[in-house]
Amino acid sequence: MADLQGIAEGVINGKRDDVARLVQAAVDEGVGADVIINEGLIAGMSVVGDKFKKNEFYVPEVLIAARAMHAGMDIIKPLLAESGVQPKGTIVIGTVKGDLHDIGKNLVAMMLEGGGYEVIDLGVDVKPEDFVAAVKEKGAQIVALSALLTTTMPSMKDTIEALKEAGVRDAAKVMIGGAPVTQNYADEIGADGYAPDAASAVDKAAELLG
Ligand code: B1M
């Protein structure tokens, strides 16, 4: 019988090989990709998110858990197209123009993936027009912006302005975060949401997509 609980525990404990083995066994038994993702991989990552929020887990544990989750996702991904499982939404993420910090952004991207979203990661030093292009070409419903420098926070505002100028501001919600970023700043520049950490970013994405 498929060990979905074991998959979740493997993710929580960062046991990459265990997760890959148990996911493959579940696939071989004919368990649906959606069940493996929701009751195994996502269930595990949401515990990781809760522990991170409560300071029971720190960055290294989250990265190791995310790596284990990816080992499972690598097996599931080719099956998703066949089984018709839809992601909860598409999110384009990047660190804004002028900013090269990506550790926090990568964590947010991994947690969002673990939360069941398709994540398109544009990397660092991303120009406003590249976010605009991703919304147009990929149909992203959320634009997720990260900034670690007070000097690059204005690039978040520039990105929102660029989305308006391109006529796609209403097509996607804008979520922002990063150490110097605050809810007040999000309100000031007209972002739709702010999240203080990677786990809260998953909750915020769900809230923004209703
Ligand atoms: Co830089 N750096 N850095 N740096 N760096 C800081 C940010 C700084 C606070 C250090 C300091 O002076 N005390 C300072 C910024 C000061 C300021 O603007 N207020 C600073 C500076 C000044 C600089 C340079 C200008 C230094 C120089 O060259 N003179 C330069 C700038 C380069 C550039 O970007 N153009 C620079 C360069 C670098 C390195 C390249 C050496 C390296 C980055 C490596 C990399 O990212 N690949 C680096 C690092 C590592 C840091 C510190 C030490 C750590 C940042 C980090 O990764 N934290 C940082 C000091 C510090 O924070 N202690 C510092 C861990 C990470 C998990 O947290 O990124 O906050 P964080 O992400 C969190 C949340 O913020 C949130 O979730 C994450 C997980 O919970 N979050 C989001 C992040 N994005 C989100 C998006 C969301 C939601 C939540 O929604 C979309």
Image (tube, rainbow, N blue to C red):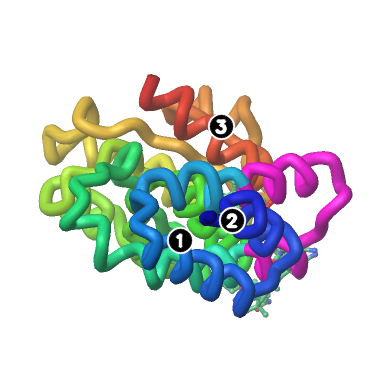
Q: Quadrant of residue 170?
A: top left
Using residue 85 as the reference point, say whether residue 207 is left or right of it.
right
Q: State the image coordinates of residue 179 (x, y, percent, origin top left).
A: 69, 50
Q: Is residue 151 visible?
A: no
Element type at marker 1?
Answer: helix
**Residue at the extreme bottom of the image, as rendered:** 17
Q: Are marks 2 and 3 in contact (CB under 8 Å)?
A: no
**Above-or-below relation of 45 to 192:** below
Q: State the image coordinates of residue 61 (x, y, percent, origin top left).
A: 76, 65
Q: Quadrant of residue 10?
A: bottom right
What residue type is disc 2 on? Asp
| Residues packed near mark 2 inside 10 Å, few (<14), some (14 to 19) or many (20 plus) | some
Magenta span contains residue 174: no
| Residues packed near mark 1 inside 10 Å, few (<14), some (14 to 19) or many (20 plus) | many
Q: Mark number for residue 86? A: none
The residues bearing labels 1 and 3 have C-alpha atoms spaced at a distance of 28 Å
Along the line of sight, the residue nearer the viewer: 184 or 71: 71
What residue type is disc 3 on? Asp
The residues bearing labels 2 and 1 have C-alpha atoms spaced at a distance of 7 Å
What residue type is disc 1 on? Ala
Residue linked to disc 2: 3
Q: State the image coordinates of residue 34 (x, y, percent, origin top left).
A: 37, 45
Using residue 155 as the reference point, say whether residue 19 is left or right of it.
right
